[in-house]
Image: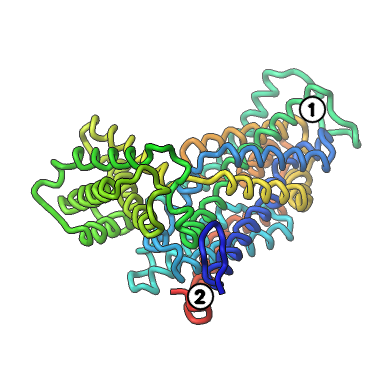
Amino acid sequence: MVMDLFGESLSFAAGFFLLLALALALSFEFVNGFHDTANAVATVIYTNTLKPSFAVVWSGCWNLIGVLVSTGGVAYSVVALLPVELVLNSGSGAGFAMIFALLISAIIWNVGTWYLGIPASSSHTLFGAIIGVGMANSIMTGHGWAAGINWGKAQDIGMALIVSPLVGFICAGLLLLLLKLLVKREDLYKAPEGKNPPPLWIRICLIGTCTGVSYAHGSNDGQKGMGLIMLILVGLAPGAFALNMNLGADSVQTTTTELRQVVTTLQSQAGTTTVTQDEATAELTAFIKPTGGKPTEKTYAAIIEQSQTVADDLTNANVKTFGDLTRDQRIALRSDIYLVGESLAKLLKKNLITDATAAKQLKKTNSDLNTVTKYIPTWVKVAVALALGLGTMIGWKRIVVTVGEKIGKAHLTYAQGFSAEIIAYATIQAADNYNLPVSTTHVLSSGIAGTMAANGSGLQRDTLISILMAWVLTLPVCIFLGASLFSASLYVTLHIFGVQ
């Protein structure tokens, strides 16, 4: 039985896995919506600034806008944590197992903490599942438990996830104290009275901060699902998604020129060393792995060989756009460009290109090559945005109650809500600029706790213990879930469905 999806004829098993994986990815974003985005509406609801029904729709719409204008940088930062061989072969049985393990682990933990009304982090959840999958894959391939994890990227993301709540707590508290010093309006520091809305100027401020946090959440959290969806599409429908088919008519010529520039720039680094095409692929695959050491002349020769071969193949094929390439050519070109691009990125990150002019040229080249393979189609953004927005509108109440009522001993004041949200917005936007995923939940709930501490309102011990326990347990639990589900999914895909 054959299924026709995205212009490709797929076997029943491949088509089934494609649809199931897409459904799970969108379900993850739906859960993310009512689990994480609810934080954005807590302040406007509990200060009577907006009615709940309007607040969640408003927040959902701005989440949607945030997703639509996102660059995709965060999406591929998440993908960079995954084992290289699984990223390159995401359509294999192991690739399927990886995707299912990540998504199911994240959904299980997010739904569980949401049901208990605990503001846990979808970012930490996915991060833990990725580490679990990397460990399991590395052990099963005989490389030791730590070899399958990109520890450099994990350190960057881990630091962002750890530091951002501290920033939220400290900066929100300091902002509240600064407001008290500069803004002498008593109504700003009062808790709402009954169901009465605040003065108009305060409502405008709180609606503005709610809008900002919702937009920032969409632009950051929404990208996590997009990266996984692209892995699914590239793995199962590579003819349509292996390369960015929306690039201009000169896309092939531009790519060829950039690859030849790599050859010219790195020629002196390779010396007289030469390698074959197969040796180049093996060398670069090993180099970009977390365990890959310092580059040698062979590494530079491999980058040159890979770049030169691809440039020559594109020239000899006499094609103008990627649409002129065959399905197999697109698959091969994606892998080759990915290896060259990731190798250049590693050289640049470690400052191994000491010549400033050469480093600048390679940085531009790497950026241009990324547009070929690291892209997000508009329809994927729309699908994720709708899932995130609908999730916000449907399941918001449990987390909102915790954030609005159970963190501090006193009711949330207008100034506290404003301070926590403006710091959350600024923190998430800053993380976006560095393509780092952060937790909206952690930043905002920490910000509210910081304002309660600064205001002398007191914090509810039981709630804080529950939140801290969820934060502490998220990584180990999701590492275990990711590893266990990867092993189980791999068995199913290989032995039941026969996907190699």
Mark 2 → mark 1, Cα distance in angstroms = 53 Å
181 relative position to 187: left or right: left
For mark 2, give the secondary structure. helix
Q: Residues within 10 Å of mark 2 (few under 14, many from 20)?
A: many
144 relative position to 173: left or right: left
Q: Quadrant of residue 39?
A: top right
Residue 203: mark? 1
Question: Which residue corresponds to the image point at 26% horizontal and 45% vertical from the top-left?
Answer: 315
Measured as percent of width and height from the top left, residue 472 is found at 57, 57
In this orientation, which residue lies closer to the viewer: 13 or 191?
13
Residue under label 2 = 493
Q: How many marks?
A: 2
Measured as percent of width and height from the top left, residue 444 is found at 65, 41
In this orientation, which residue lies closer to the viewer: 414 or 66?
66
The answer to whether residue 11 shows anywhere in this view is: yes
Q: Kindly identify the amino acid type of the residue bearing the numbered disc 1.
A: Arg
For mark 1, give the secondary structure. helix
Q: Residues within 10 Å of mark 1 (few under 14, many from 20)?
A: some
Question: Which residue corresponds to the image point at 20% horizontal and 38% vertical from the top-left?
Answer: 265
Question: Which residue corresponds to the image point at 17% horizontal and 50% vertical from the top-left?
Answer: 301
In this orientation, which residue lies closer to the viewer: 444 or 204?
204
